[in-house]
Image: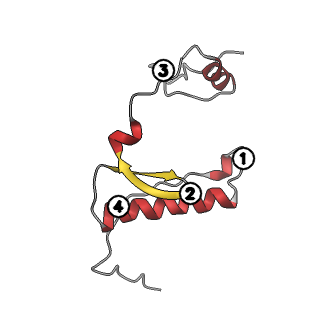
């Protein structure tokens, strides 16, 4: 069977897919619907309206577009010695720190 060629009006937009098969908690119908709403809004902003520098946010049950600078405000940091980070490391979550040999430096040794 031949694959139909895309319409000349078709635009490509980047996408991301999270593999939920390895997640500890399965997404709820609300999560799936919300993700779809964010995806539609992002495609609308970037591909259809060609608006750059905006970010989709959920505000009072509505998806809205705000300036990225407004969305991120100021740099938010996490204390690397804090309890949350230490607990994450204890269960094997990596923060991307690898030794030259490829060993995860974030994982605590039992």
Horizontal side of 11 relative to 18 (left or right) equals: left
As helix, strand or loop, the secondary structure at mark 4 comes to: helix
Question: Which mark, residue 61?
Answer: 2
Q: Nearer the viewer, mark 2 or mark 4?
A: 2
Q: Give the Cα distance between marks 3 and 1.
A: 32 Å
Q: Position of residue 88 (x, y in %)?
A: 64, 26
Q: Using a 10 Å C-alpha cutoff, classify the residue at mark 3 as few (fewer than 14 neighbours), some (14 to 19) or many (20 or more).
A: few
| Residue pointed to by mark 3 | 101
Please state which of the two labelled residues, at mark 3 or mark 2, is closer to the viewer: 2
- Label 1 residue SS: loop
In the image, is residue 7 above or below residue 107? below
Q: CA distance from mark 3 to mark 2?
A: 47 Å
Is residue 26 found left or right of 8 in the rendered image?
right
Going from N to C along the chain, the mark reached first, 1 or 4, is 1
Give the label on residue 45, or none: 4
Q: Is residue 72 left or right of residue 35?
A: left
Circle 4: is it few (<14), some (14-19), or many (20+) Cα within 10 Å? some
- 60 and 31: which is toward the camera: 60
Quarter occupied by residue 4: bottom left
Residue under the image location 38 percent in, 58 percent down: 14
Badge 2 marks a residue whose secondary structure is: loop
Q: Choose top left, top right, bottom left or bottom right for residue 49.
A: bottom left
Please tell me which of labels 1 and 2 falls first in the chain: 1
Looking at the picture, does residue 3 appear above or below residue 56? below
Q: Position of residue 87 (x, y in %)?
A: 67, 22
Q: CA distance from mark 1 to mark 2?
A: 23 Å
In the drawing, what numbered circle is on residue 25?
A: 1
Q: Earlier in the sequence, mark 3 or mark 2?
A: 2
């Amino acid at each position: 069977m031949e694959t139909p060629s895309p319409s000349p009006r078709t635009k490509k937009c980047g996408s991301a897919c999270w593999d939920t098969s390895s997640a500890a908690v399965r997404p709820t119908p609300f999560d799936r619907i919300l993700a779809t709403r964010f995806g539609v809004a992002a495609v609308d902003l970037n591909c259809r309206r060609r608006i750059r520098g905006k970010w989709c946010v959920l505000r009072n049950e509505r998806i809205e577009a705000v300036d990225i600078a407004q969305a991120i405000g100021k740099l938010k940091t996490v204390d690397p010695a804090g309890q949350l980070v230490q607990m994450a490391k204890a269960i094997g979550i990596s923060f991307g720190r690898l030794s030259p040999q490829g060993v995860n430096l974030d994982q605590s040794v039992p």
